[in-house]
Image (cartoon, rainbow, N blue to C red):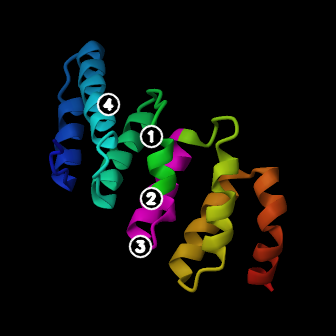
Amino acid sequence: MSVKTTYSDIRKFISQINSSPTVEKEREVIQKELAKIRNEFSNPKITAYDRMICSYKLAFISTLGYEVDYGMVEVIMLLANSKFIYKHAGYLTFLSCYRNVPGACSLLINTMQHDLQNTKDEVICETLSTLAVISDAQIAEVVGQIVMKLAF
């Protein structure tokens, strides 16, 4: 059974971490949240919104220095969504959690090609920003011509 996740869940999670009196308590809070996220991701009926909220939590956990070793498929699914809010969450989480995972960047090639040819400037800008941060030769080789057309 899935529980609807909301932005207030993110605030509550961050408050729990900030109020943790010890590093051990912080780890406990994070491990509990990771278990909830893993459970949410295993739900076949998860909505894009719930996937986005969970991905933001993963990005925050990664920013704190904890390893995030799952959720990449869900992030790629966010990137494939046509709504910018979900794409943004996907790119942000990918950069926070998975950009240094060997072979992960190759999963973005098709999505980036598609997004660079989007008619919405915000999607193109988000994609170019991600491309600049990733600096992956394989992706640059594939999308380089598209980027050149955008520039000139």
In the displayed structure image, the side of residue 129 where residue 29 appears, left or right: left
In the displayed structure image, the side of residue 87 where residue 133 appears, left or right: right
**Disc 1 on helix, strand or loop?**
loop
Residue picked out by circle 3:
83
The residue shown at (52%, 53%) is: 76
Q: Which residues are magenta?
A: 78-97
**Is residue 57 shown in magenta?**
no
Q: Residues within 10 Å of mark 3 (few under 14, many from 20)?
A: few
Residue 92, compared with residue 110, is above or below; it is above
- Nearer to me, 115 or 125: 115
The residue shown at (39%, 68%) is: 85
Q: Position of residue 72 (x, y in %)?
A: 50, 43
Q: Position of residue 21 (x, y in %)?
A: 19, 19
Quote the CA–CA distance across marks 2 and 1: 11 Å
Residue picked out by circle 4:
34
Quote the CA–CA distance across marks 2 and 4: 19 Å
Residue 81, compared with residue 96, is above or below; it is below
